[in-house]
Image: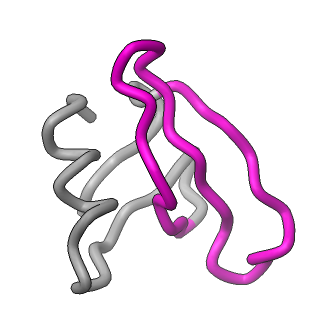
Amino acid sequence: MNKLRASQIAASPVMANVSCNGVPIYIQNVDEANETARIYALDQPDQEQEVPLHSLTEH
């Protein structure tokens, strides 16, 4: 996923259908300088992680 689209999704009040390695996730914020995103799996909101933007897929 590119930086601009990931930032748009993170800023939007509308939930987007995004996954990381096949797992549905929520994007909390995007670090454009490092090209990473702070995410969590929808079924595990207490387990945040930072992942590279290229690992995210919008459906």
Residue farthest to the top? 34
Q: Position of residue 26 (x, y in %)?
A: 50, 68
Identify the image's colour scheme: rainbow, by chain, secondary structure or one colour: one colour
Question: Residue at image x 66%, y 62%?
Answer: 40
Q: Position of residue 53 (x, y in %)?
A: 41, 30
Q: Position of residue 35 (x, y in %)?
A: 41, 20
Question: Residue at image x 59%, y 54%?
Answer: 39
Question: Residue at image x 47%, y 14%?
Answer: 34
Against 58, is 35 above or below? above
Q: Quadrant of the C terminus?
A: bottom left
Against 20, is 30 above or below? above
The residue segment tinted magenta is 24-52
- Where residue 12 sits, quadrant-wise, is bottom left
Against 42, is 19 above or below? above
Decide which of 57, 29 is in the foreground and name it.
29
Q: Position of residue 24 (x, y in %)?
A: 53, 69
Tally of marks: 0
Question: Residue at image x 75%, y 77%?
Answer: 45
In magenta stretch: residue 30: yes
Magenta span main SS = strand
User: Is 45 positioned to the left or the right of 42 in the image?
Assistant: right
User: Is 19 positioned to the left or the right of 39 in the image?
Assistant: left
Against 46, is 32 above or below? above
User: Is 56 positioned to the left or the right of 41 in the image?
Assistant: left
- Where residue 16 sits, quadrant-wise, is bottom left
Q: Quadrant of the N terminus?
A: top left
In magenta stretch: residue 38: yes
Decide which of 57, 28 is in the foreground and name it.
28
